[in-house]
Image: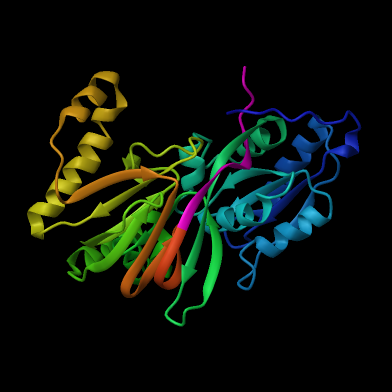
């Protein structure tokens, strides 16, 4: 549900902050665009906070909020967006996106402009507030310690987490998300399975052996791949998918289902009707819910919004409906 925030008329009453990854943004260009928009929109002087290896953005965002920021612009990749969202969601401030990096997944799923600096900054300063869901997750490690994090796009065990481990960081900087292709092939060849027990929405506990488990607040990936066709950022639910292919034919079935059915058929009303009649395949199982608990027989790699978060022996993840306020383009 969209919600529009009313601000006082005083020029200095609205203050923006930019939390930026210095490696991924052209700071001079960003400052030039911000200067124009804050002046034209009657905002006060913008605050600037830099991320670092030690602080992905949570600490910088808390400083921005303490300084009185009404809006925090996350300037960086998916990791920066996730970190800023984690710190800003329980405040009165809104989150704006200046996409950078290889994924820009939340921006894609919100249909925001990509690779358009001036356009993104314009939306931040002139757009409207929209409430979307936020996913929280408690991750229990092998030592039984538990850490809590937020994510805005997806959490995954198996294929995608292993893919991140195998991705060459230097190649990623040069060619972007295409660097994941070779890592994906390596992960696909890995025949190791996840042996897990899981419960959805406090229902009965089920056992499964799967190659991959992904939980998504939204479902679109780069290259117009729709992994989770029924995931929406503002419906109070997540969608999960279990991948359990058996050999080459199993992976082929998954590829056809995701690339053809999700990515092509579901783009039209007729196509969606056809997709609804297609046969379910054992290699791919979808479900929706708002709370999921998982326990594994041993710890496996886990990722959140494209960043590795070590290994998980167990986890609990749930949706906080409408907990995050983001800036979208002004409605006509």
Measured as percent of width and height from the top left, residue 106 is found at 50, 45
Residue at coordinates 30% horizontally, 50% vertically from top-left? Answer: 241
Q: Using residue 8 as the reference point, say whether residue 182 is left or right of it.
A: left
Q: Quadrant of the C terminus?
A: top right
Measured as percent of width and height from the top left, residue 203 is found at 35, 51
Q: Quadrant of the N terminus?
A: top right
Measured as percent of width and height from the top left, residue 29 is found at 67, 48
Measured as percent of width and height from the top left, residue 218 is found at 43, 43
Res 176 quadrant in image: bottom left
User: Can you see residue 221?
Assistant: no
Residue at coordinates 17% horizontally, 42% vertically from top-left? Answer: 256
Q: Is residue 208 above or below residue 190?
A: above
Residue 324 lies in the magenta stretch: yes
User: Can you see residue 234?
Assistant: yes
Q: Using residue 9 as the reference point, say whether residue 134 is left or right of it.
A: left
Res 50 quadrant in image: bottom right
Residue 59 lies in the magenta stretch: no
Residue at coordinates 45% horizontally, 61% vertically from top-left? Answer: 316
Q: Using residue 142 as the reference point, say whether residue 249 is left or right of it.
A: left
Residue most extreme to the top: 332
Nearer to me, 139 or 256: 139
Residue most extreme to the front: 204
Q: Which residues are magenta?
A: 317-332
Q: Using residue 204 as the reference point, say whether residue 310 is left or right of it.
A: right
Q: Main secondary structure of the magenta part?
A: strand
């Amino acid at each position: 549900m969209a919600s529009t925030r009313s601000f006082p008329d005083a020029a200095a009453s609205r203050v923006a902050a930019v939390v930026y990854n210095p490696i991924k943004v052209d700071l001079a260009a960003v400052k030039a665009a911000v200067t124009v928009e804050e002046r034209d929109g009657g905002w006060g002087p913008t605050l600037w906070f830099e991320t670092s290896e030690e602080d992905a953005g949570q600490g910088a965002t808390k400083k921005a909020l303490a300084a009185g920021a009404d809006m925090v612009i996350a300037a960086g990749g998916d990791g920066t967006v996730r970190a800023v969202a984690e710190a800003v969601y329980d405040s009165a401030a809104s989150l704006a996106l200046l996409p950078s990096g290889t994924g820009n997944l939340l921006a894609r799923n919100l249909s925001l402009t990509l690779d358009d600096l001036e356009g993104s900054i314009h939306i931040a300063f002139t757009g409207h507030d929209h409430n979307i869901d936020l996913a929280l997750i408690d991750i229990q490690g092998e030592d039984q310690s538990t850490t809590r994090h937020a994510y805005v796009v997806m959490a995954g065990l198996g294929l995608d987490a292993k893919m991140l481990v195998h991705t060459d960081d230097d190649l990623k900087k040069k060619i972007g998300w295409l660097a994941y292709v070779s890592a994906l092939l390596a992960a696909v060849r890995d025949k190791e399975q996840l042996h897990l027990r899981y419960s959805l929405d406090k229902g009965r506990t089920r056992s499964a052996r799967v190659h991959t488990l992904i939980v998504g607040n939204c479902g679109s990936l780069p290259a117009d791949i729709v992994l989770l066709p029924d995931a929406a950022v503002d419906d109070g639910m997540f969608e999960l998918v279990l991948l359990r292919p058996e050999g080459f034919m199993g992976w082929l079935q998954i590829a056809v289902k995701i690339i053809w059915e999700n990515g092509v058929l579901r783009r039209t009303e007729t196509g969606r009707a056809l997709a609804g009649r297609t046969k379910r395949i054992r290699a791919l199982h979808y479900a929706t819910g708002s709370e999921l608990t998982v326990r594994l027989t041993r710890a496996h790699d886990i990722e959140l919004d494209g960043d590795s978060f070590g290994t998980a022996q167990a986890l609990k993840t749930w949706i906080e409906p409408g907990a995050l306020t983001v800036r979208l383009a002004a409605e006509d």
